[in-house]
Amino acid sequence: MNPVFVASDNIISPLGFTTTENMEALIKGITGISLHDNACFSPDPFWASMLEEGKLAEKFSEYANPGSFTRFEQMIICSVKDALSRCNLDFKGERTLLILSSTKGNIDLLDHATGSRFENNRIYLWHTAGLIQRFFGLKNKPIVVSNACISGVLSIMIGSRLIRWGKYDNVIIAGAELVTEFVLSGFNSFKSICPGPCKPFDKDRQGLSLGEAAGTVVLTVNREMAQDGCGISVGPGFSGNDANHISGPSRTGEGLYIAIRRTLEKADCSIDFISAHGTATPYNDEMESIAITRAGLHQVPVNSLKGYWGHTLGAAGVIESVASVFSLRENTLVNTLGYTSSGVSQPINIISKTKQAELNSCLKIASGFGGCNASLLFQKI
């Protein structure tokens, strides 16, 4: 089967509009999470990581009229544009596919004031994917992956498999998510929103911080296009569903353990660090610590990046995978912002300080509502 390489990537968040800008902020310990007081989203102030509308519209105006596209669509187009500008691939041919990853898409269009500006079917993810496809002149019908918070990792996994099986030469994976009244009220109903910036794996964690972002990963079969002379390949990946509960994760970490175990069985290398899901909710962090320990990886350095970007749902697996690729290329372990002392039962090795290390492989893991879990290997070539 064909090998798969990372050709290019992008991250758009409150920390910047390129991967470099975002990663420089992470290395400096800068967070995008801040206090917001907006009655359109919540009657009470809330902590979240949110893009400034003016900056997004200004950037998008380089490509098209912002008034003709939703914020969600603008984020995706800006992200894909930047990623494609950084690689020399024939993405308009028959051998290129687009995969869109999101849990809610244009969900803000349910609000009459916003939605009245656009046609009704703009709310559907399949319609958004088709719009993005046409904007970039892509020939093939796109795929939508919307499977809770593993959507981003699962999209990269599916894209790499399609290249490995010879179906396509290039796959563009774009993930995006908005912070909206709908999403915020949903997590508030679970009482899972932190009254401050989130603290993944910490003993004082009180819940998650929501975030909005867009990310793009361009995969290719062309080894010469592997990024910046320090190529990264996408290795084996698996998903597992423990069907434990509609929102609560397995107390034994069964689904995530299965996904990790199967990935390790196919891997041809040891694991140098783990990019965890790390939502800073009591049950998720505990479950991950159990699954990591059951897989025999409790001594491997682990980080969560939710303290920088918040939880970006369907975009999380994409932007955190981009950060993992950056870490491999730069031999840099990024610390878990907000973490001070362990609040999980298993003695996993949380990265508490950003530092240099010789890195050759990363295991990216993700978990989501409905018991879904995913695990994916990235490796230097």
Image (spheres, helix red, strand yellow):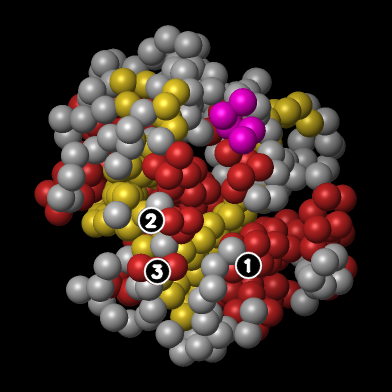
First to last magenta residue range? 24-28
Q: Secondary structure at mark 2?
A: loop
Quadrant of image for the N terminus: bottom left
**Is 281 situated above or below 125?**
above
Label 2 Cα neighbours within 10 Å, binned few <14 / some 14-19 / many ≥20:
some
Q: CA distance from mark 2 to mark 3?
A: 9 Å
- Asked whether residue 183 is in view, the answer is no
On the image, the x and y values in percent for residue 322 come to 49, 49
Left or right of 116, for residue 222: left
Instruction: Categorize mark 3 by other alpha carbons within 10 Å: few (<14), some (14-19), many (20+).
Output: few
Q: Which residue is mark 1?
A: 85
Corner quadrant of residue 22 = top right
Residue reaching furthest front? 229
Residue at 54% x, 19% y is 338
Location of the C terminus by quadrant is bottom left
Q: What residue sits right under mark 2 in the picture?
A: 231
- CA separation in Å, label 3 and label 1: 16 Å
Asked whether 249 or 239 is in front, the reply is: 239
Q: Which quadrant of the structure image shows residue 107?
A: bottom right
Q: Which mark is residue 224?
A: 3
Secondary structure at badge 3 equals helix
Quarter assignment of residue 291: top left
